[in-house]
Amino acid sequence: MKIGIDRLSFFVPNLFLDMTELAQRRGDDPAKYHIGIGQDQMAVSRVSEDIVTLGANAASKIVTEEDKELIDMVIVGTESGIDQSKASAVIIHHLLKVQPFARSFEVKEACYGGTAALQMAKEYIKNHPERKVLVIASDIARYGLASGGEVTQGVGAVAMMITKDPRILSLEDTSVFLTEDIYDFWRPVYNQFPEVDGPLSNSTYIESFQKVWNQYKAVTGRSLADYDALSFHIPYTKMGKKALQSVIDEADGVTQERLLARYEEAIVYSRRIGNLYTGSLYLGLISLLENSEILKAGDRIGLFSYGSGAVSEFFTGYLEENYQEFLFKEDHQEMLDSRKELTVDEYEEVFNEKLPEHGASAEYTSDVPFSIYKVADNIRYYKEN
Ligand code: HMG
């Protein structure tokens, strides 16, 4: 039985910051941001947006009335949880009006959480082929104003519907995963922003890719030539390229050219959004599918998922007939093009806004479909679509 991604979509807030402006304000050469890091713009969220609203807005594009009766699980991969106990998936389940006899929960392992959710969904559909699982990867990636990681921030969510006979990407069964207890990036519960060892995170990412890729080759006998494209977790767009370049000499010239060209297509959206943490790999996949004129049905894509801490996985899938018809290319491009550009002052002001805490109240207005309209008695109230 084929199982995989039947629909997928992303959502980002309608504000962004230009990286040239940020570099100039921070006293850096803009070329470092655009070329060295590979980021042109950064998505910025308002205080009335959180992982619930981002996730619900991403999912509302793909969840049909029929789906609401067929979804058995809503799983949210995130590392930007809003509650130590209650899962954001429970609120999203409510906002989307999914049938009540469903499981809703959150999964956490840094940026790997979305992949854990996806693989869990696949296993569930194996035993319940007539049902569906909604997987959401939703995060607000923040390192702090003028911090070393600021240039790699981002915000947004990806939603995927996992079903049998998927219309976009069928997932293959063999995958290789790896766990290593490393402190490259982590966030103690009392920290607003993560602790990060930038150089260690970069090297662990590359070494993890090499380890799972080498093991995958040993298990399957496949090589780079078996892939039409590779899609990477993209904390910033230069990162995946460094990992790809670290193994590219294994391939013949034609394969090298193909994989490097597809890589550029996979980072079109990330260059304009930044890191989505759990959603980044899947934003890259959407970018690849929506911006590649070369890919076609039957093509095999390898996916590298990396979550600091660290858990990584290399898994694969192949494209289904007419998959292009089930994408949201125009909607996504329109969403990016219609965003409002912030000045650095406005960005810093929005960044510093906080929701009220310890029982205090506030009300918000917003034209974003799902958004927070009120906080009172330690509860966030969400405007429904
Ligand atoms: P940094 O110190 O700002 O930058 O840290 P740098 O000095 O290392 O320079 C970056 C690149 O810009 C270098 O290129 C420079 O040469 C180049 P490279 O040698 O690496 O190819 N450069 C220039 N290029 C052109 N013109 C110039 C110029 N100047 C310099 N004038 C760092 C960068 C990414 C470490 C930092 O932003 C950071 O700590 N970010 C957060 C951590 C991160 O994203 N790590 C990635 C791997 S870990 C991961 O993916 C997991 C994660 O998503 C979290 C999770 O799993 O939950 C983060």
Image (spheres, rainbow, N blue to C red):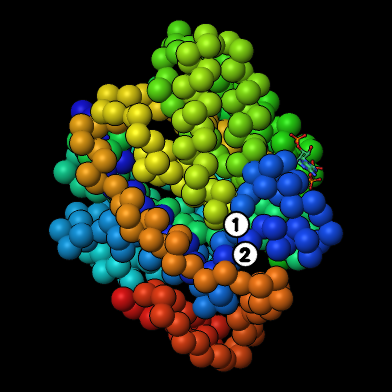
What is the total number of numbered labels drawn onto the structure image? 2
**Disc 2: CA contacts within 10 A as few (<14), some (14-19) or many (>=20):** many
The correct choice, above or below, for 282 with respect to 328 in the image is above
Q: Are marks 1 and 2 in contact (CB under 8 Å)?
A: yes
215 sits to left or right of 195? left
Residue at which label 1 appears: 41
On the question of residue 141 being in view, the answer is no
In the rendered view of the protein, which quadrant contains the C terminus?
A: bottom left
Image position of 338 with respect to 31: above or below:
below
Residue at the image position 17 percent from the left and 63 percent from the top: 65
Residue 46 lies left or right of residue 336; in this view the side is: right
Residue at image x 61%, y 31%? 241
Identify the disc placed on residue 17: 2
**Residue 321: percent from the left, percent from the top?**
20, 32
**Does the closest atom of ligand 1 sit within 8 Å of the Cβ of label 2?**
no
- Callout 1 amino acid: Gln
* 72 on left or right of 277: left
**Which of the marked residues, 1 or 2, is nearer the chain's N terminus?**
2
Is the residue marked 1 within 8 Å of ligand 1, measured from its CB? Answer: no
Q: Camera-side residue: 18 or 58? A: 18
Q: Ligand 1 falls in which quarter?
A: top right
